[in-house]
Amino acid sequence: MPSTTKSISGVSASTFAYENFQGLDTSRDITSLDTGKNQHLSKSLNATVDWRGQIVRDASCKFRKGQFKINHVRFFGKDEVCYVEETGSGLNFKSERDHILENVYPTAAIVTSTVFNQAVQFAARSRPMYRYDGINFTRNLSPSINSMMPSYITSVQRRLAVAGIPGKETQVHLSRVDQDEIFPEDEDATSTNVLRAGFVDVANLLGTADQITGLGTFEQNRLVVFTSDRAIIYRIDPDIDRWTVDDNANINIGCISHNTIVNAGTDLIFCSRSGIHSIKRSEENGILVFSYSLSDKIDLLFRELFKSVESAEQINAVFDQDTAQYHVFFPQPGGELCRRLTLAMNPEGGEPQPKFSTGNFLNARCGAFLGGTLILGTTGGIYEVLKIEEEVDGSFTPEMEIITPLLWHGSLEDIKETRSVIIQAAGKGTIEMDATDEDGRLLGSLLFEVNDTSDDNYMEDVPLSKQYERSWSHRYRAAQYRLKSTGGGGLLRIIGFAVTVRS
């Protein structure tokens, strides 16, 4: 409810506050999103809404390595990465130790990877597999692997699992325990060793002509085999005789890109044609395994992003465990631009729906996370994402842009006459605010200098509310407000804003 006050002149006024922001919502029209409290946004670029409901500018980034476009990145050590760099002649494998293997794959190849046997294992459709152990990039010498040339790769229960095999599109081949160069066709046909390599075929479990589109791991011993329309879960054990299908899993949703499959706490998150989904175990009985949608609020936006990529397999994702954020990258046609969709979950739990935002900072197109460090592969090398409050010399800070839906300040018909606007903000930077009415006409603009220093927020004779209150005299039926940041570094957040309207 708006608060009503009366000025010295006797003119009554109502204050309409907008706070506890909930991120993007494209499931409803912008004309029907004015709620005041728990306010959704129509655009949130390079800024996320945290679990407190505050709009927070995305963190700054510092350059680490590389020069050209990065298509894939993976940690091979505690704070060391190897990556796939695209040049005009092909894809090069490189590491931060300056080890290089040039023109390994053609530029169109989609690279997948996992860590197994203390080495990063690389795979790409119809191409040889490679590994990097911190010293050399070497080719996998398994005759079976060199015959299969799989597309997807992961590790589970001390075995390396591969799929997306030309001619064997419904099979998953698993290596011998603790071996990355011994696969089923490499084994002695008469071997009875329970640690031997083996394979599973999901063709008759599917009952359709569907094919495998990705692999993931769930809990400690579950292998999730994704197809276009569903997922099948196997219980995998070092003992090959104990492999079974998990009958308690019922997942009728498929995956569009292997590189979107990531572990997030106890869940497994992935992207389907319709949105972002999570596989989890039932909290009620601890037995049933099911999937549920996380992105119903932004279904139209997700489908727009999905249609914007040339190939669904180009979509990448990374999960930042420290901030509980799932970043999905959508490379755009032309090979330079990339759009990002971020899902922010409540790190304290208990929130049914996450909050969404978008980004295009640095045109990041892939990422990796380990030990509190998030790195991004961009069109111009690898960057490390700093903490939101950090400022480092030479770092780069994004410019955030926030646009509200149409705000009616009560009546849908009456013309409102505004008096002032107040922004509650903290941190460091300049916020430019402007507004357009329901017909798209520009009403005006204001500048707010935000600086958490003693010469700004702590002037004893000037209340904080007055420092960020500006005269705002306009007439409109409804208006969209835009907040854009420029300059500054480190933490910048918007807690809320309010518009005072003459009654």
Image: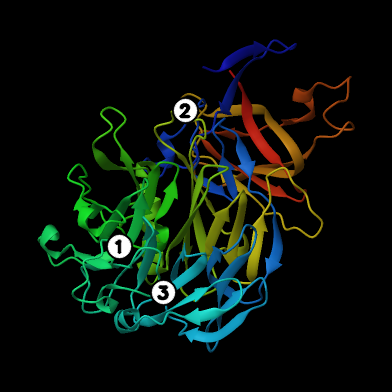
Earlier-in-chain disc, 1 versus 3 = 3
Query: Could you tell me if residue 460 is visible in this image?
Result: yes
> Would you say 145 lies left or right of 444 here?
left
Real-space Cα distance between discs 1 and 3?
23 Å
Question: In the image, which disc is placed on residue 176?
Answer: none
Location of mark 2 (residue) = 35
Q: Is residue 12 above or below residue 240?
A: above
Residue at the spot 35% in from the left edge and 56% down from the top edge:
216
Left or right side of 159 for 47: right
> Of the residues shown, which amino acid type is indicated by label 2?
Thr
Name the residue nearer the viewer: 89 or 279.
279
Which residue is disc 1 drawn over? 195
Percent from the top left, x then y, of residue 51?
54, 33
Image coords of residue 3 (percent x, y): 59, 15
Q: Residue 7 in the image: state x and y as whole percent.
A: 71, 13
Mark 2 to mark 3: distance in Å? Answer: 49 Å
